[in-house]
């Protein structure tokens, strides 16, 4: 079992930055791929970014965040980060991290086994 806890959300103006953290505890985290998903009010959950466990830590991004968001991981700290720059009002959502019992990241939420409770990100115009 892996427990995940997100932090770093908050209120920021458009064009600003935030860094989200996802800290894992429990079962070894370093062998899991990790993804970030978000869900805006009244909308379905959508993929944001993912990072693989090996293969150089291959990364995957949604087109909507490519070039603005960066996912990274520090296995020694059991932590995955999501650096979000040039934030837009449409980035407003609850952001969840998720871990997958497989080395490679995925775009699909159903392929993840463990989920955090989420952290709210609000971007004002």
Image (tube, rainbow, N blue to C red):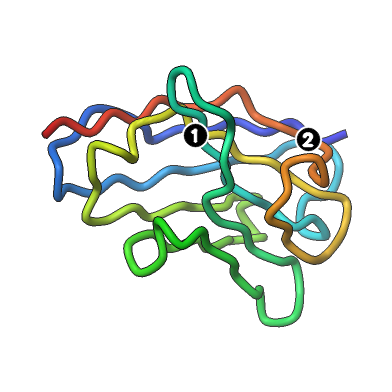
78 lies above or below 13? below
Query: Observer-nearest residue: 122 or 80?
Result: 122
Closer-to-camera residue (116/60): 60
Q: Quadrant of residue 115?
A: top right
Helix, strand or loop at label 2? It is: strand
Percent position of residue 69, x then y: 38, 59
Quadrant of the frame with the C terminus: top left
Q: Residue 67: x percent and y percent?
A: 35, 69
Q: Residue at x 69, y 41 (%)?
A: 98
102 and 80: which is toward the camera? 102
Q: Which mark is residue 121?
A: none
Q: From the viewer's perspective, is residue 83 above or below residue 124?
A: below
Q: How many marks?
A: 2
Q: Tell me the residue at 14%/50% (across/down).
A: 15
Q: Which residue is mark 1?
A: 95
Question: Which is more N-terminal, label 2 or label 1?
Answer: 1
Q: At x 66% / y 74%, what residue is drawn?
A: 57
Residue sitting at the far front: 43
Q: CA distance from mark 1 to mark 2?
A: 14 Å
Q: Are marks 1 and 2 in contact (CB under 8 Å)?
A: no
Whole-percent x, y for residue 4 in the image: 67, 33
Left or right of 111? Residue 44 is left
Front residue of 28/32: it is 32
Residue 49 point in image, percent of width and height: 55, 56
Secondary element under disc 1, as helix, strand or loop, is strand
Q: Residues within 10 Å of mark 1 (few under 14, many from 20)?
A: many
Quadrant location, the N terminus: top right
| Residue that sits furthest to the top in the current view | 42
The residue beneath circle 2 is: 114
At label 2, counting other C-alpha atoms closer than 10 Å, the crowd grade (few under 14, some 14-19, many 20 or more) is: some
């Amino acid at each position: 079992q892996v427990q995940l806890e997100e932090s770093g959300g908050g209120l920021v103006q458009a064009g600003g930055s935030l860094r989200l953290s996802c800290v894992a505890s429990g079962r070894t985290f370093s062998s899991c791929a990790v993804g970030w998903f978000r869900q805006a009010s009244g909308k379905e959950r959508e993929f944001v970014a993912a990072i693989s466990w090996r293969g150089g830590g291959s990364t995957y991004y949604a087109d909507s965040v490519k070039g603005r968001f960066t996912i990274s991981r520090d296995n020694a700290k059991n932590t995955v980060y999501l650096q979000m720059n040039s934030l837009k009002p449409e980035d407003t959502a609850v952001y969840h991290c998720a871990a997958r019992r497989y080395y490679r990241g995925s775009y699909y939420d159903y392929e993840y086994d463990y989920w955090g409770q989420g952290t709210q990100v609000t971007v004002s115009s």
